[in-house]
Image (spheres, rainbow, N blue to C red):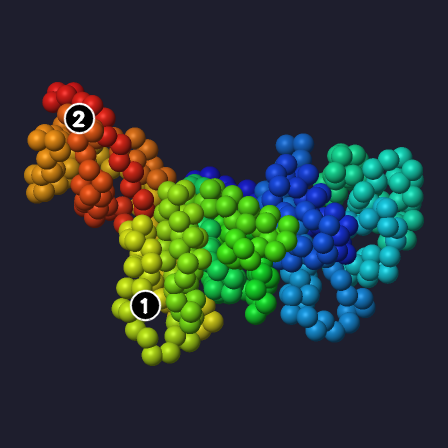
Amino acid sequence: MNAIRTPPVLALVGRPNVGKSALFNRLTRRRLAIVHASHGVTRDRIAADAEWEGRPLRLVDTGGVGVLDDARIRDTIAAGTRSQVAAALAEADGIVHVVDAQAGLTPLDLEVGRLLHRAGRPAVVAANKADNDALAAQAAEFAQLGRDVFPVSALHGRGIGALMEAICAQLPEAAAEAGPEEEGPLRVVVLGRPNAGKSSYINRLLGEERVIVSEIPGTTRDSIEIPFAIAEPDGRSRRYVLCDTAGLRRQGRSRDAVEHYSRLRVEDAVHRADLAALLFDATEGPSRQDKRIAALVGEKHKACVLIVNKWDLAGGQTQKAYAAAVRDALPFLAHAPLVFISARTGYRVAASVRVLDRAAAAYARGVGTGLLNRKLHEAFERVPPPRVRERRMRFYYAVQTGTRPPRFRLFVNNPALRTPAYEHYLVNRVRRELGFEGAPVLLQFAHGTRTR
């Protein structure tokens, strides 16, 4: 039995365009949040594990607070951003109030300061963009916010040490939660076109408005990582990291730099994921863009589950007909299970989690050499390889060479005698007979001999 350590949560909060995301990236040492001169690039809250001087932290980047005096927020995205900030403050153990040293103190900075005082959490002020001594000296005016002020430059790394030393001194130690030893979390990337319902699906899984949902395409811009766990009857839990991604438009529709970087974030999220959940909009049917997104999953050799969302709005079409259309559009993901859901009503959302879990298990599955060779010999006997230039490929033995994805090396008399159709047959046999449904199966053919 090992204790699971929960690090303290440190939230970065401030008005738009003060450099919160730049500071977040500096502290995590990764470019997780999109940094751009446009206002309102970050909308949802983005979290990542980090450490400072060997101390673990959970950092949370938030969208810019852009409304004075709790004025009524008419814009759906602005309202969602404000609610995400409130949620981040509620779960934070400490706060860094980020301001712009070059712009000076503004009414919005004072509004954010009042919001943070009401939250009642330990906090400091990071006067960002203090790239030289003169700007650092000007940061003294932010003392009006009632917090200790630290001139910093997220771009150049100036003053970061003093800032973090001050706030970390006010944070609690990592909490210990008793429980059995667990494997690391499974990374699930949620993909799809704009407005396919990715954020609604994640919110339904979590039982809270964790990511902003709007009818406006492109609401999600960063790839947002969210821990998620399902309790097992034996006290263990299956742990996930859900990654909500920007909806991928057609290349010609990506109109600005933010969308370009959103696309890069999606590609990186797929690369780092164990499993992809590809969502379709049941009211529109599979499209060319769905095929392009699916191709990205196939190229990276990720386990995949196809999820048809908004089935409550599908009208008179049948699941059988829709499934046939998806399979016809995505023949290269024929191994991916397909499930119909409604994130809005909750229809079969729990079932989709079970399907995801099985596909993830297949992706990480190892199989004994004896069983593997017995099933492959049966496959070769059942359907012998075709003749190629009057010769036939003969199978000797096989070994599994890796997982995530499952990889196998088959030793044969001559690898050049294999054909794509026969390799496809073997892949399907391995997947079906050895429990790899939902996962890509990679075969490598090598010269071998009859004896090992």
Number of residue marks? 2
Q: Which amino acid does label 2 sit on?
A: Asn
- Disc 2 crowd rating (10 Å Cα; few below 14, some 14-19, many 20+) is some
Compared across the picture, whether 291 is left or right of 9 comes to left
The quarter of the image holding the C terminus is top left
Instruction: Identify the residue shown where x is 51% and y is 65%.
Output: 195
- Disc 1 crowd rating (10 Å Cα; few below 14, some 14-19, many 20+) is some
94 over 313 or under it: above or below:
above
Along the polypeptide, which appears first: circle 2 or circle 1? 1
Q: Which of 260 and 161 is in front in this view?
A: 260
220 over 316 or under it: above or below:
above
Which of the two marks, 2 or 1, is nearer to us in this view?
2
Q: Which of 4 and 419 is in front in this view?
A: 419
SS at badge 1: helix
Compared across the picture, whether 16 is left or right of 290 comes to right
The quarter of the image holding the N terminus is top left
Q: What residue type is labelled 1?
A: Tyr
Residue 214 position within the rendered picture, expressed as x and y whole percent measured from the top left? 58, 68
Instruction: Identify the residue shown where x is 81% and y is 68%.
Output: 69
15 over 27 or under it: above or below:
below
Residue 351 position within the rendered picture, expressed as x and y whole percent measured from the top left? 35, 63
Which residue is denoted by mark 1 in the rendering? 322
SS at badge 2: loop
Which residue is denoted by mark 2 in the rendering? 414
Compared across the picture, whether 126 is left or right of 269 comes to right
Q: Distance between the residues labelled 2 and 1?
A: 42 Å
Residue 290 position within the rendered picture, expressed as x and y whole percent measured from the top left? 42, 58
Q: Which of 50 and 338 is in front in this view?
A: 338
